[in-house]
Image: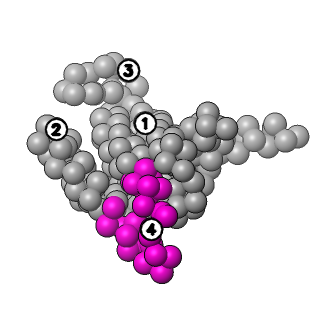
Amino acid sequence: MRLTTLTNGLVKDNPTLVQLVGMCPVLAITTTLQNGIGMGLAVVVVLALSNLLVSLCRSFTPERIRIPIFVIIIATFVTIVGLLIEAFFPALHKSLGLFIPLIVVNCIILARAEAFAFTHGPLDSLLDGIGMGLGFTGALMIISLIREILGTGAVVLGGTTLFQLPIPQTISMILPPGAFLALALILAVINGLRNRKEA
């Protein structure tokens, strides 16, 4: 049961590629692999810790004010994570910009607090947060890789070029339309595989 709680968010209930929630950062910041990893890990930390705290507080949280309390908990962890990123990874903080504070209103985090953490124990809630966060991170990394490779022909991480491909650069892939194209390509592959499996 606990292993399923952890792994559901990776593939079966992936928040980005199956549930299609939290799409704003997915479409906006996936221009580089570094951005995708940075945003994804920030969401993992916020989601796991907010799920844990919501679960710990559920027995004495009044039903009618639970949503404002969820938002305060999430905003607290987002502020902490944002300050840590700014202190230790200033270049990443600059490239993610406004999207770090917007984690507060990311529907993945609020939905998991409402749908899972408020009705489950602390350990299950923590595992759910980690699983959903890692699923979100994985989706960001896949989309980022496609966009960065097709857009620049290379993948750069931490200022180091991991590899360079001798392919023509398609600048539109690192512009906003590229996010929609990459996501559409991935969803088409997923739906094709699912349809083939069902058939």
Looking at the rendered image, the quarter that the N terminus falls into is top right
- Name the residue beneath numbered marker 4: 60
- Name the residue beneath numbered marker 2: 89
Q: Name the residue rendered at 52%, 56% in the picture.
A: 117
Q: Amino acid at mark 4?
A: Phe
**Residue 69 part of the magenta segment:** yes
Q: Over which residues does the magenta segment extend? A: 50-73
Q: Position of residue 174 (x, y in %)?
A: 35, 45
Checking the image for residue 166, the label placed there is: 3
- Name the element at disc 4: helix
Q: Are marks 2 and 3 in contact (CB under 8 Å)?
A: no
Closest to the observer, 103 or 30: 103
Q: CA distance from mark 2 to mark 3?
A: 31 Å
The crowding category of the residue bearing disc 1, from other C-alpha atoms within 10 Å (few below 14, some 14 to 19, many at least 20), is many
Q: CA distance from mark 1 to mark 4?
A: 38 Å
Q: Is residue 100 left or right of residue 18?
A: left
